[in-house]
């Protein structure tokens, strides 16, 4: 990863080293060793220049928001949950065929028909008395 950053994103790496209060001439010397350079690249925080270039300018949140919009627009279909901390401890749902909740897409006409049925069945229940207390 360090070699890729040095080759493709040198100026981003230099900018992050400068942000740490060091100079580019300090890189790969006793002042900033090879191991420390690897740590700067591998442990780059989300707001660093190296991370911005490695993620092609997209933060994790921006990627998730774009995926949500694509799913809502019907452009993409997510078949499994996103990898995140704790996901490996998730227990499988015995009622699901593949362990992932699937929603059902409805056409507007089908939705309207279901709403009409629900509203027509609303009067079937016995009416009760409702008491309201006012202050």
Image (cartoon, grey):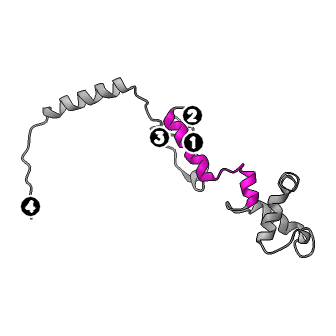
Label 1 packing within 10 angstroms: few (<14), some (14-19), many (20+): some
Q: Nearer the viewer, residue 95 or 135?
A: 135
Q: CA distance from mark 3 to mark 2?
A: 26 Å
Q: CA distance from mark 1 to mark 3?
A: 27 Å
The residue wearing badge 2 is: 76
Label 4 packing within 10 angstroms: few (<14), some (14-19), many (20+): few
Q: Which residues are magenta?
A: 49-73
Percent coordinates x, y for residue 80 in the rendering: 57, 40
The residue wearing badge 1 is: 67
Q: CA distance from mark 4 to mark 3?
A: 47 Å
Q: Are marks 4 and 3 in contact (CB under 8 Å)?
A: no
Which of the 4 quarters of the picture holds residue 41?
bottom right
- The residue that appears at 8% across and 44% down in the rendered structure is 128
Q: CA distance from mark 1 to mark 4?
A: 48 Å
Helix, strand or loop at label 2? It is loop
Q: Is residue 60 magenta?
A: yes
Helix, strand or loop at label 4? It is loop
Residue 99 visible here:
no
Label 3 packing within 10 angstroms: few (<14), some (14-19), many (20+): few
Q: CA distance from mark 2 to mark 1?
A: 7 Å
The residue wearing badge 4 is: 134
């Amino acid at each position: 990863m360090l070699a890729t950053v040095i080759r493709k994103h040198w100026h981003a790496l230099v900018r992050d080293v400068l942000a740490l209060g060091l100079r580019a001439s300090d890189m790969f010397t006793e002042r900033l060793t090879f191991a420390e350079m690897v740590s700067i690249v591998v442990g780059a925080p989300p707001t660093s220049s190296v991370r911005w270039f490695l993620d092609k300018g997209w933060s994790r949140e921006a990627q998730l928001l774009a995926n949500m919009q694509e799913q809502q627009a019907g452009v993409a279909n997510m078949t499994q949950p996103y990898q995140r901390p704790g996901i490996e401890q998730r227990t499988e749902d015995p009622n699901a065929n593949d362990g992932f909740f699937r929603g059902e897409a409805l056409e507007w006409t089908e939705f309207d028909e279901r709403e009409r049925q629900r509203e027509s069945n609303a009067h079937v229940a016995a009416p009760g008395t409702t008491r309201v207390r006012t202050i």
